[in-house]
Amino acid sequence: MNYQKTYKKQLLPAIISICTLPLYAGGAIAQEESVGLEEIVVTARKRQESIQDVPVAVSAISPGMLERGSINSSLDLGKMVPNVELHETAIGSESLSASIRGMSYDDIEKSIEPTVGVAIDGVFLASNSGGVFDLFDVAAVEVLRGPQGTLFGRNTIGGVINVTRTEPTGDFGMKLEATAGDENLTDVKGIVNMPLSDKGGIKLSFKNTESDSHVYNTTIEGRRPFKDSETLGLAVKYNFTENTSAVLSYDDYEHNTTAPDNVNPFGGMIESEADGWATSPQKDPLTAYLKGENTTLRVTHNADNYEIKYIMGIMDYSEVVREKSWGTTIDFFQVDRDQDFKQTSHELQYLSNLDGPMNFVAGLYMLKAESFITSGPGQNFNVSHDLDSKAIFGELNYQINDLWSLTLGARYTEEEKDLDTRSYNGGALGNAARLADSYDTEILNYATPSFEDDNTSYRVVLQREIESGMVYASLSTGYRSGGFFNRGVTPLENESFESEEVESFELGMRSNPTANSQLNLTYFNADYTDKQTTVITSANDPMCDKQQNPIGEPQTITCSFVRNAGAVSMQGVEFEGMYMPSDNLTLRLSFGTFDGEYDEYEYNGVDISDKARLLYAPELTAYFGAEHTSEVAGGVLTLNGGLSFKDDVDTQADWATWAGATEVVIESFESLDLSATFVKDMGAGTLKLRAYGTDVLEDDNRVSRRYDAGGGFSWAELAPRRQFGVSVGYEF
C-alpha cells in the first residue's frame, strides 16, 4: 500500500473534516454546557501561556490529573500522548528509551545523544540515565513533539519532556504517600515544607521503592528482586527582594536494579522455555546500579517589562552494569560495564514583557560533559569521552494585527568532542592493570579522535486566530550532534559519525468549540538527513570483521557501531480531544498516525533502504480516558479509566542481512489502567485513598523489546505484567 497517497488523498482530509465539525456545530453542544475545562498553563516557549495559545504540538498533564489518576512515572506519559513511545532500557537503571514521531534512541552509551530531550527544572539531561522518574513532586509535565532546538537546545530533534518540580512553599506543610502492590511492591514517598524566616522556605523530599521481578524464573523457581531505589532531596528558596529570588536544590539517589530475566524467543543459542511470556530460565540476571547526585540553581529577577533567569545544573553519577546469561541457562559473553558521568550546564535567559506588539526570548547556553567507561571481559576496553557545547539562541514573536502573529527563532550551536579509547586482547588484562595504564602488548586498538561541528537551527511560525481558537503553520529544523560510539573495540567501530538534521513542517489547530470541549489537531511532515543508526551485528560482518583480530573468543560474538543512514521521510496526524458532558464527567481521546520510510540507506556499498525500518515507531497510537467524580461519605470519589493502544513496532536488527526470517517485531497491544481515588478533608489535613490496576487486560507478560545480533545471539525483554495495588496519603 502507498501510505503517502493514502494520507494525502483519504485519511488526512477525513480527519480534518471530522475534527473541525464541532466548530460549526458549537450551538448544539453549547446548550448542554454547564462547566468549563481546566485551563492548563505550559512553558513550551519559556514563558507561561495557556496550552491553547501555543503554536507547538504540546501535551500537558496537570497536577490535578496526576493526583486523581494512575499516572505515577514518566513512562506513563507514553500511554496518553500521541506518537510517543517510552520504555525503560533493560541495560541500565532508570534509563529512558524514548521515541517521538519515529525518532528514537535505545541504548545507554554516554557518547551518543538521545533524540528526545528531558529537562527537569530547566536543566537538560545530556544522557538518558535518570530519564525514568516519579511524578509525585511535580508542578507541571509537558511533552513537546517535533524539533525543539530553538529554545530547548541540543539534541531535541524528536521532542522534549519538560518537567517542573514544586518549589518550597515557605509555610509548614507535609505530603505523604505509601503504596503496596503485587510483586511485593512498597513505595513510600513524602515532602516536608518549612519556612525560612520570612524570606523563603525549605523543602525536604524522600522516596524509597522496593519490588520483585514480574518474571518468574524457572531455574531458581522464584522471582528475583527487581528494584531497591532511594532518593533524598533538599530544596531552599530565598527571596532576596520582592523581584529577585533563588531556588537551590540537591538530590542524592541510589538505584539498585536487577532487570527482569530475559528470554530467547527467536533464534539464539538456546530455545526459550518461556510459557506465555511469563517465565524465563535465565541463569544469571542483569544487574544495574546507579548512584549519584544532582544540584540545580535557579535565579530569577523580575522587572516591569522583562525577566532574567539563570539556571545552573550539575549531574554527577556512577553506573555499573553486569550481564552474562542473556536469557539462557548458561553463562557466556560476560559484560561488566563501569561508567562515571558528569555534566555541568549554565543557561542565561532574557524574556521581554513589553506592552507593544513584539516580545522576545534570548539566551546563552553552555554544557560540559565527561564520561569514563571500563568494560570487560566480553567487550574489553577503556573509553574517556569529553563534550564541550556552546549556544546562543532567541525567539521573537510579533503581533501583526488582532488576527495574525509571526514567530521567528534561531539557535547557533558549536560542539567539540574528544575520545580516548583503548581496546585489549580478550580478558588477558584485568581492570586493575588497565586502570594502571599497563597496556604493553595486550592493547589492540588505541585512538584519540576529535569531532567538531556547528549548526544553526531555526523556526518560523505563522499563527491566525479563529472564533474558537487558532490555527498555525510552522517550519522548523532540528539537530542531533555527531561523534563517536563508546562501545567499539576496533578502528572501524570507532569511526566518527556525522550530525543528523531534520526539517519539519507542521500545520495545527487549537480550538475550544465550547466552554466544555477542546479539539487539537496537528499534521506534520518531516525530512530526516544523515540519520544516525546504531548497528548491532555478528562479529564477521564486513563492516568490522572482528575475526581478523587476534582477540579472545568472547569478543567475536557481536560488532556494534553507528553509521549515518542517508535520508528518511515521515508524516502523520495527531489528534487530542476533551469533552465534559457534565460537572462530574470528563472524556479524553487522542490518537496519532505515523508513516515513515528510508529513502536512502547505504550499507557497505549496498542500498538497503527497501529493507530497513524505523525502530520503535508505531503506525498508530491511541488513548481513550474517562474520569468521573462524585460526593461519597463526605469526600470526593474519582473513578479513572484509561485504554491505550500501540501498533506493531520494529526493534533492533541487522538490516543488511535481514530477510524476514528473524522476528524483530513487537506485536500491537492494548493496555487498560483503572483507579479509584477517594479524597476527604479531615479538618487538619486531607486524606487520600487509592486503589489501582495497571494493564489489567494482560494475563501474562508480553515482549517489550527484541534484539538480534545478526546471527551472534538474540534475546528479548518481557514487559511488566498487570499489577494491582493500594495507596494511602495525607497532606496538610
Image (cartoon, grey):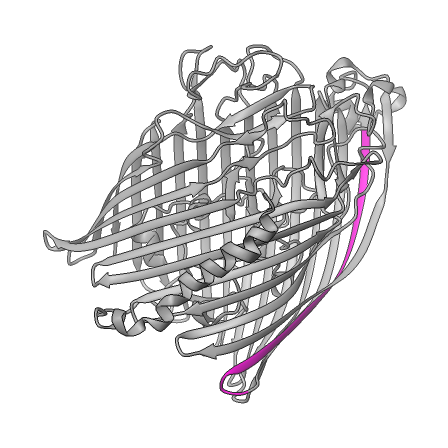
Residue in the foreground of this view, choosing between 528 and 11: 11
On screen, residue 179 above or below 656: below
x 32%, y 34%: residue: 696
Q: Position of residue 160 (x, y in %)?
A: 56, 55
Q: Main secondary structure of the magenta part?
A: strand
Residue 428 is drawn in which quadrant?
A: top right
Q: Residue furthest right?
A: 441
490 left or right of 112 in image: right
Residue at the image point whose x is 36% and y is 72% from the top: 24
* 660 lies left or right of 402: right
Residue 361 shows up from this direction = yes
Residue 707, x across and y down, in percent: 61, 27
Question: For this view, does 410 lie left or right of residue 484?
Answer: left
Based on the picture, tell me whether residue 390 belongs to the magenta stretch: no
Region rendered in magenta: 401-422
Q: Position of residue 311 (x, y in %)?
A: 58, 63
Can you give x and y, in whole percent of width and height, for residue 540 in the image? Answer: 79, 21
Judge by depth and name the residue closer to the eye, 71 or 312.
Answer: 71
